Amino acid sequence: MTKVLVYEYISAGGDAAAAARPEMLAMGRAMRDPVAGDLARIAGVEVTCVCAAGDTAAAPRAPSLTWRVPPRGHDAVAFVAEEAQRHDAVWVIAPETGGVLAALCGAVDASRWIGCDAAALQVAGSKRRTARHLAQAGIATTRAWSADAPLQADASAWVVKPDDGAGAIDTHVYDDFRVAESAFLARLGAQEPVTFEEWVEGDALSLSLLCTRGRAELLSVNWQHVNVTHGRLAYEGVTVGAIALDSLVGRACSELAQRVARALPGLAGFVGIDVVWHRERGPVVIEINPRVTCAYAGLAARLDTNLAARVLVAHREVQHEAYETAHDGAHDSTHDAAHDGGERICHVA
């Protein structure tokens, strides 16, 4: 029997302020429940899903699914680290904001962690690092301000947003370059981890992928509903599978997914990429979401396959290969040492 822990940061009470916002709590549950439900349908798997007190009434039920309520105001990293010792695998859904996802990854042994590794999270956790890393691989990304290459006032609009943010929170769009620059410098001066980049004109899309060992399978190209009201960008949901995979856009996005996976081979499991389809440049990467996204629920309902089962199988295969490699290496070292020892004995004799 394989025991899997599912911990979604907001609905588990890891962030009380976010959980108090109905839209954030709803997004957390919308990602948590289908993952837990898919895992619970796998033969030989027992699932422990974490939720805050009072949040179990509408939670899905299954014979192999147990709901765990942590202490109110618990330390998420310490709680997950302790629970990980009682489970064979740990599937965490958490924002990159403030290094939360990376910290939770660091609390779990790599052999148990389902998802992107620490190196991939370090890159994907920062929009600036992501853009630089992908640009070095020849992948189209946004142009962001940096001290050695400040932006010029030659775009149609500019964006100031958290460098490690998620869900379009605190994201502002400016038509005036000087106003945008002033807002950026003010937030930078307030010690905010913020980025200032050009606005990319085009259609807002997201790609849903299954990644493993430097490869990616594009599951769907989704239409993102974003709205700009009085300069504030708002995320208003996603239409899953809005663009056919065999279309011109779909094929270009599939090629992009493969290139991103090769550039960041530590991407693993369910991964989302936010892109803008530019009329001339094609898909331009805005950010990588190295975790389950809101599109998972729609995909789980549309596809005939169990996505969580595929992620778990891939995780097991990688861990099995790592185990075999480690033991083969240990065997070779032991054999070499014994052989060398035998040679020394012969020489001495």
Image (cartoon, rainbow, N blue to C red):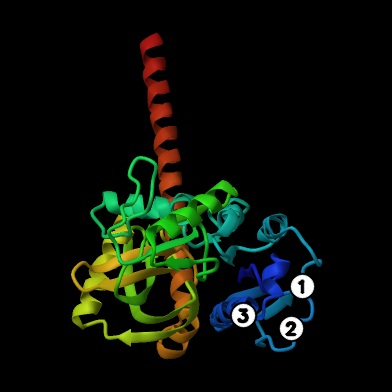
Question: Which comes before the other along the chain, label 3 or label 1?
Answer: 3
Residue at image position (48%, 67%) is 172
Q: Residues within 10 Å of mark 2 (few under 14, many from 20)?
A: some
Amino acid type at image mark 1? Val
- SS of the residue at dot 1? loop
Amino acid type at image mark 2? Thr
Q: Picture coordinates of residue 286 (x, y %)? A: 37, 64
Please say whether residue 255 is visible from this viewpoint: yes
Circle 3 residue: 23
Compare residues 271 and 144 and report the one nearer the observer. 144
Compare residues 289 and 349 and report the one nearer the observer. 289
Q: Is residue 38 above or below residue 85?
A: below
Q: In which quarter of the image is the N terminus?
A: bottom right
Q: Residues within 10 Å of mark 1 (few under 14, many from 20)?
A: some
Please say whether residue 293 is visible from this viewpoint: no
- SS of the residue at dot 3? helix
Q: In this view, does 117 lie above or below 237?
A: above
Circle 1 residue: 69
Q: In which quarter of the image is the C terminus?
A: top left
Amino acid type at image mark 3? Glu
Q: Picture coordinates of residue 202 (x, y %)? A: 29, 75
CB atoms of marks 1 and 2 within 8 Å: yes
Q: In which quadrant of the rendered view does residue 260 lie?
A: bottom left
Compare residues 74 and 69 and report the one nearer the observer. 74
Question: Which comes before the other along the chain, label 1 or label 2?
Answer: 2
Circle 2 residue: 56
- SS of the residue at dot 2? loop
Q: Is residue 85 above or below residue 248?
A: above
